[in-house]
Image (cartoon, helix red, strand yellow):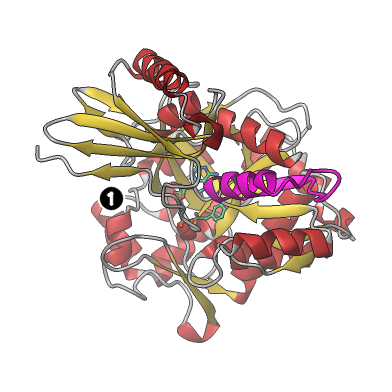
Amino acid sequence: MEKNYFNPKVELLSKEDLRALQLKRLKSILNRVYRRVPHYRKKFRQAGIRPSSLKSPDDIRYFPFTTKEDLFVDYPYGLLAEPLEKVVRLHTSSGTTGKPKAIFFSKRDILAQAELIARSLVMSGAKARDVLQNSMTYGLFTGALVMHYGAELLGMLVIPAGPGNTERQIELMQTFGTTCIHMTPSYALYVATIIREKGLKPGRDIHLKRAYLGAESYSEETRGKIEDMLGVKVYNCYGLSEMGGPGVGFECPARGGLHLWEDAFLVEVINPKTGERVLPGEVGELVLTTLNRNAMPLIRYRTKDLTTLVEEPCPCGRSHIKIARILGRSDDMFIVRGVNIFPQQIESVLMGIKGVAQNYQIILDGYDEMTVKVEVDREFFDGRIERLIKLRDEITDRLKQALQVRPKVELVESGTLPVSEGKAKRVIDNRIL
Ligand code: DLL
């Protein structure tokens, strides 16, 4: 059954054929939004451009961007390109304050996104006989439901576990022989720690093969740690509610970046300040255009996610472009004493140090002070204070080297910092600046 979801006619298309397919779809989607969505019509007119101006996918650069703010003009239904009777589902983004971004799906949109997930799972080697424990949050968040539909389409047995209740998660894994998990990387690290503390062994007591981790940025070191602790191969899964949820980008077994499905999305990476395309290999903001979304197409949507295009051909043979793992969101970046810092840089240092456990928190306060609270293995709290000081100094020095700023480091016992079942909140900014 899973064979259906590896489609060489789409995944192995030559670059030229892929461009031709994109051009056809792009013309159609631009025409649709111009005809059906007054907000787009107005923006295109203001920019002095018409859908017929587009002669190649590259000409998309002359069209205006869509930003998060645009989603709130004529909120909530203003960007619909279908009448409400054709719209069957609402998801919202995980914004923490204010009105959530509302994203709508038609039946065809739900199926199209499920197909991208099924295709991605097959790419990772998953089969219909696999058992997927889906530990993302079910509900308004796309994470669980979109993966659920895709995995079912492939024919996997899906356990709709949802997040939290870690004891129960582990019981489910043992009872039903879970082979694949879907969760956030921060929760995966937590689950892995509890599994280890219970004395359970991968391969003997739990039989996981693959972990699909996404919804928040994580470093290569975190991936390595989770792979060691759980005996799995970790596949990075990227997406955002606005583009239909998870499954927009996904790693193949060759890794080295995530394939971004170019039959469904047109990919650009721009300089967030100038709006111009960046040079190959340069970090910039990912901008995506939906190529086959029905209910709520988005043109040149600014994701705020920072990444690089990986232009080299992939050993797996798929022609769809790859993006490097997401460095973070442009609004995740914080500045301490004039230095730009992403939480992932800190995570990358911490997770490479022996003795560091699963969780950490960055606290900014005072005039410009940064404190990093780091969980370390319980054995460091056996009263031998010199060992603890040595570890603290090592962490401080390695962070100073990587960031050019010396943080204050506080070590706490593994399992004592707040665990988030959904996306982790890494930075607490109490500065009085
Ligand atoms: O997080 C969709 C998703 C669910 C993706 C499950 C993967 C797995 P939102 O809540 O709208 O949707 O948040 C989207 O999360 O713009 C990124 O900043 C971040 N993000 C998502 N996946 C990754 C990833 C879902 N693999 C926002 N690496 C995006 C880094 C990620 N950041």
Going by the image, does 178 lie left or right of 188? Answer: right
Q: Secondary structure at mark 1?
A: loop
Residue at far front of view: 383
The residue at the point 28 percent across, 50 percent down is 48
Q: Quadrant of the C terminus?
A: top left
The residue at the point 53 percent across, 46 percent down is 186
- Asked whether the viewer can see residue 77, the reply is yes
- Asked whether the viewer can see residue 273, the reply is no
Instruction: Tell me which corner region of the image, top left, top right, bottom left or bottom right, holds residue 284.
Output: top left
Q: Is residue 204 magenta?
A: yes
Q: Please tell me whether residue 192 is drawn above or below residue 401 in the rendered image.
A: below
10 Å crowding of disc 1: few (<14), some (14-19), many (20+): few
Q: Please tell me whether residue 39 is drawn above or below residue 254 in the rendered image.
A: below
Q: Residue 133: x percent and y percent?
A: 71, 61
Q: Nearer the viewer, residue 422 or 49?
A: 422
* Number of numbered markers: 1
Residue at far bottom of view: 85
The residue at the point 32 percent across, 42 percent down is 427
- Residue type at mark 1? Gly
Q: Residue 416: x percent and y percent?
A: 44, 47
Label 1 CB sits under 8 Å from any ligand 1 atom: no
Residue position marked by numbered label 1 in the rendering: 48
Q: Nearer the viewer, residue 48 or 113?
A: 113
Q: Is residue 235 magenta?
A: no
Q: Residue 62: x percent and y percent?
A: 36, 42
Q: Residue 169: x percent and y percent?
A: 67, 61
The residue at the point 10 percent across, 40 percent down is 432
Q: Please tell me whether residue 212 is drawn above or below residue 132 in the rendered image.
A: above
Q: Nearer the viewer, residue 255 or 267?
A: 255
Q: Quadrant of the N terminus?
A: bottom right
Magenta residues (range): 186-211
